Every structure is written in structure tokens, then in C-alpha cells.
Amino acid sequence: MSYAARGIQNEFRLNNVQIGWILSAFVIGYGACQIPIGLAVDRWGPRPVLAAALLGWSCLTLATAAVPFLARITAASALGFFIAMRILTGAAQSCVLPSGTKMVSRWMPQAQRAAGNSLFFMGIGLGGILAPPFTVALMLRYGWQMPFWVLGVVGIAIAFWWRSYATSLPEQHPGVNAAELALIRAGGETAPAGVSSQWRWKTVLSNRSVVMLVLCYGLGGYPAYVFYTWFYLYIANVRHVDPAAGGYWSMLPYVAIVCLTPLGGRTSDLLCARFGKRIGRTGVGILGCFLATGLIVAGARLADARLAMILLGLAAGFHLFGQAPAWACTIDLAPSRPATLFGLMNTTAQAAGAVAPVLTPVLAQKLGWIHSLDFAALLVLLTGLLWFGINPEKPVVT
């Protein structure tokens, strides 16, 4: 949608704030469903929940391409249709990250969970690398609707493949042998001694590490969505890069994410093995946040557009580098209910993320783009400071 926004804006004569509402609509639906989806994943498993959701959001992707037709036959506002479709698409996609966290908790040994989560999240980067040139090329040749038609059909095919291939538990999969299962179960999903599997909200929300982790991950949602929603438009409209070339330049954050996210996860696991989880998780989180902060501040001020885009792309990568330990912390702090805890974290992140597409152009209009990006950098810095209050070595007693 962030790439199609330019074509939609021109066709329907929408201003930047209206486009911001369309971009934020996805985040509203996405964030509102995180906790109930996390509960559902912990109860029914990631395979059936993810299959149903993938089918649903793929059909909604097709419906988004049909918005001009729907608006024409109903005489309703196209803006309203876009917002409604994006809210529903966000609600359907809300199961992805809780399902991924749950899969990692069941399929990865304890010593490899940060790396496992980071490999899963690397898909964000891979999708981001493939999407810009593919989407921009289709839009320039066939119009903004074509990527929605194509990706909707592809998503439906993947939904049926996932349903037929995946299993929620490794022992249910015919491709997992006894040695692999023993290795996975060595670190298992089972809660440590003294930690109940009962989920009591009052106890969970009174735990300092949980509160700090929720706030840390939550504030990180704002800068993440600045990159996801405004980076291409920033390149085209502010840095005045040709739209076709901008499709390639906008790949930079995702290239950095692909490279740096698994590095963050692997580094966290290695440090945990040597120094314990307190240093292994928090140290990587703090380092990633501080580096990302400096890169955003520097990139926003550089006159050279190419160098600025490189630094901002690296900032996105180090931001995810620092978030990789947070995903593993959900399993450290809530061994039996990681999807529910992640749902709580991601609800907060999406609340902050929903603000980013709308507030970013408002701040840019009033204060300039440099200070608009400075605000994102400030929130990244705060996420780094919050890491000091998290102790993943003490699971929450529920």
C-alpha cells in the first residue's frame, strides 16, 4: 500500500493526511486483534489460525484492488472503502507474528530461539526487498491495482500450501525424526520449575520485566512504521528521486533488515550462552537501539540523498537487530504462553505504529522532515533505555 499510495493519491485527489489515514487503518485493525489472536494461537495452535488468516487477507487484498469499482457502483467514498479494507486486512494479518513466535517456541531449542525468531522476522526484509521493484514495475506498467490482483492470488495459493504442509507441533510432522525431536525438546516449551502455566493478567501486568518489555517493543512500533509506510514517499517527494529508481532505493531498509536481524538474534543467543540471558538479551537490544538512533539523526541531516538513504536504511536494520532479543524474551518470560505475551506487546507496538503514518507528515509540515525523523529517533532511544529494566532470567509467575 505504501507504494500504491502515490497512484491512489493522484487518482482520487487525496492529500498526505488522508493517505496517512489509509496507511494507519491497517495498523488499527492489526493492533486491535493482537491479544485475542495471541490467545487463539496459544489455544488452537499456529497452523490452523495462520491458514485461515492468510486466506482471509489474500481475499481482502483482491478486494482492495476493486475499491474504485465498489465506490462507483455504490456512490460511496473511495477513502472510506480503502480505510475499511485496510482495517480488515490488518485484522487478518494480526496472527502472523504471534503464530511465528509460537512456532519458534515449539520448534526451536532454547539456545537457538532468538536466532529462530530473527530468521522468521527476516521474512519482513525479504518481502521488502522483493516488493519495491516488483510492485513499482507493475504499477508503472499496469496501474496501482495490478500488484493487489497478483499478490492476492499468490497469497491464496500459499494459504493452501501452508495448510497441507505445516503442523503446529514437530512430532506431528512426518519430516521430523527422533533425533531432531529430542534436540528440540531439550529446551522445550515447558515452563521452568516454580512457574505455573496459568495466565493471570493481574500477575503478568504487575511484573516489571513484562511491563518494560511491552513498553520497549511498543515504542519501537512508531519508527518501524515510519520506515514501512513513508520511506518510499520520503525518497520520491522529499529527496526527489525518480519514482522508478526510488523503488530500488526503498529496498535499502529491507536489505539491512535481512542482514542485521538474524545477526542480532544469533549474537543474542551466543551472548546468552556465555554471559546469561540478562546480558545476552538486553545488551543486543541496547546496542541496536543506540546505533539506530544515531543513524536516523545523521541520515536526516545529510544533504547527499544517496548517503542519507543508506544511513536511514541501516537505521531500519539496526532497529530490527535490537528487536530480535525481544521476540525471544516472550518465550523467556512466558514459557507456556509466548503468543499471548507477544500479542500484548504487539498491541502496544501497533498503537504506536498507527500514529506514525498520520503524525509523520503532520510533524514534517509543521517542523520539517528533519525534526519529523528526529522524533522517530527519540522513540528508538527510549526503547534502548527501557531495556535496562528487563530481566529475562526471571520468568513471570502466573
Image (cartoon, rainbow, N blue to C red):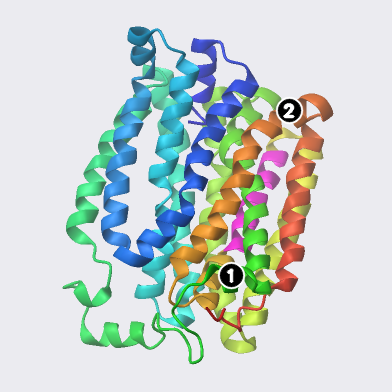
Which residue shows up at 59% across the image and 40% down it? 354
Does 195 appear above or below 382? below
- Residue 8 falls left or right of residue 226: left
Residue sitting farthest toward the bottom: 193
Does 129 appear above or below 69? below
> Residue 193 versus residue 143: which sits nearer the camera?
193
Question: How many marks overall?
Answer: 2
Would you name the residue on which mark 2 appears?
362
| Amino acid of disc 2 | Val
- Residue 263 falls left or right of residue 146: right
Give the extent of the magenta segment.
Answer: 307-323
Of helix, strand and loop, which one carries label 1? helix
Q: Which of the 4 quarters of the picture holds residue 204? A: bottom right
- Residue 111 falls left or right of residue 298: left
Would you name the residue on which mark 1 appears?
202
Dot 1, crowdedness within 10 Å: few (<14), some or many (≥20)? Answer: few
Specify whether residue 335 is in view.
yes
Of helix, strand and loop, which one carries label 2? helix
Q: Position of residue 349 (x, y in %)?
A: 59, 51
Which residue shows up at 46% across the image and 69% down it? 338
Does 90 appear above or below 198? above
Give yes or no for residue 309 being in the magenta stretch: yes
> Residue 200 versus residue 148: which sits nearer the camera?
200
| Amino acid of disc 1 | Lys
Which residue shows up at 52% across the image and 47% down it? 31
Q: Position of residue 371 (x, y in %)?
A: 81, 37
> Residue 31 versus residue 115: which sits nearer the camera?
31
Which residue shows up at 47% across the image and 50% down it? 124
Q: Position of residue 396 (x, y in %)?
A: 57, 78
Q: Position of residue 193 (x, y in %)?
A: 48, 92
> Residue 392 versus residue 298: which sits nearer the camera?
392
